[in-house]
Image (cartoon, grey):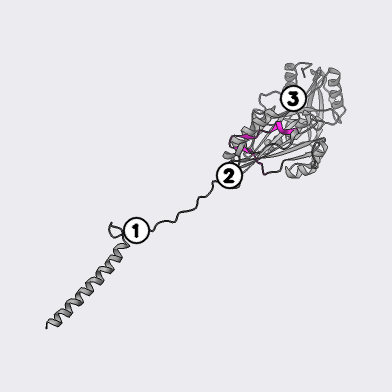
Amino acid sequence: MKRLRSSRSGARRQVLVEALVVGGLMLAGCSRRGGQRAPAPRPTASAVPAPRSLCADGGGSVSLPAFEGWFPRSVGAYCIDENADQRVFGLGGTLPVTDAAEVLALDGDELARSAPVTVVVIAYVEDKVEPGRVTASVVDFANPDVAYAFLTRRIADAAELGRPAFEALDAGAAGVLGETTAFVVRAQAVLRLDFANRRLPPARVAAAARPVLVSLAKDIGARLPGVAKLPIAAELLPAADRVPLSVRYYAADLAGFQGIGPGALATYVEGSHRYRVALAVRHDADAGKDVLSTLRKREGSRVLKREPYDASRVAETDDATGAVREWIFGRKGAVVAGVAFDVPPRAAPKGAPPERQAAVLKMKRLLDRLPAAPAW
């Protein structure tokens, strides 16, 4: 009987010991709070070096000595991209100007007609992990007339179509700002800036582009050579009632009238009436007479008797439709001004059209205000 009890006691002690051992192992794997398992220690990660700044030491530099003064190394968070090619096309460069037309999506024939031309292309990059980029290109023409004509044709076309939408920008002699593009003209140079950031959603692109486009336009615009001044005909166009950004400058033939030389044209709206004003300024009165004389030689043109400033009717015919627009041109010394109302397409009217007298009056009021020999 004693042996049986002793055997049972030994068995109970063995079970108790085993239970204590197992319990100890379980407790070893638990925290002291609520029996929760303690987190395993995390492996220590090796140190990852911070990405190198894209604009370290102020960014890249201009590798083209002739144009070094045109481009700042950095503006705000942007700097010259040291990893991007810096290219010069046309005169003063090693690349043909036709290649510049392809790179900048320009009309190659137009650039060729404007020769000699130099095109300089520099890239700016934002100092961020996902950077924005701005391509800065300067087209340097032979003279300011060609440069301003190159700029205004693009801006006026966009203004008439309503796309892309531009607003005036105070940089250089004249400038405009779009959603992702900016243009500036100063003397014979035209600056174009193009912003891109493919990582941004479309709704945020314009907001990201605006500050850097404005800063670069003003900085580079101030560095370009020459005087920030528009051609005199463009300066003398009246500002009242003018449609914003509607000025077109013609470096050769004003409004397409062959043989009369350069001049400026703009669109105006007064009430329900839409009309155009053209202005040519020459160095002396004799040259002004030549302009008016050339206009009078056009078919359908004639002098209007008893009207001021040698007023003359000049017909402009649309070759495609046969529609006729009637201009009223007059001259005061070296200045020649013309006014034409936009009217529905029609054949050449018999007798005086109803808008003729209104055009004569506007032409007279314009020349009344202008000097006969403007200072160049």
- Calculate the distance from the C-alpha at mark 1 to the C-alpha at mark 3: 93 Å
Report whether 368 appears left or right of 199. right
The image quadrant that residue 3 belongs to is bottom left
* Magenta span: 66-83
Residue depth check, mark 2 versus mark 3: number of the one nearer the observer? 2
**Callout 1: SS:** loop
**Magenta segment includes 164:** no
Observer-nearest of 232 and 337: 232
Tell me the residue at 58%/47% (across/down).
199
- Vertical side of 332 occupied by 353: above or below: below
Residue 292 versus residue 138: which sits nearer the camera? 138
181 or 54, which lies in front? 54
Asked whether the residues under the numbered discs 1 and 3 touch, taking CB atoms below 8 Å apart as contact, a structural biologist would say no
Q: Which residue carries the number 1 mark?
A: 38
Q: Amino acid at mark 1?
A: Ala
Residue topped by disc 3? 359
From this viewpoint, which residue is outermost toward the bottom?
1
In this rendering, would 290 be left or right of 199? right
Residue 52 is labelled as: 2
x, y percentage for residue 247?
71, 30
Marks counted in the figure total 3
What is the C-alpha distance between the residues marked 1 and 2? 39 Å
SS class, disc 2: loop
Give the percent coordinates (x, y) of residue 228: 71, 25
Query: What amino acid type is highlighted by mark number 3?
Result: Ala
Mark found first going from the N terminus, 1 or 2: 1
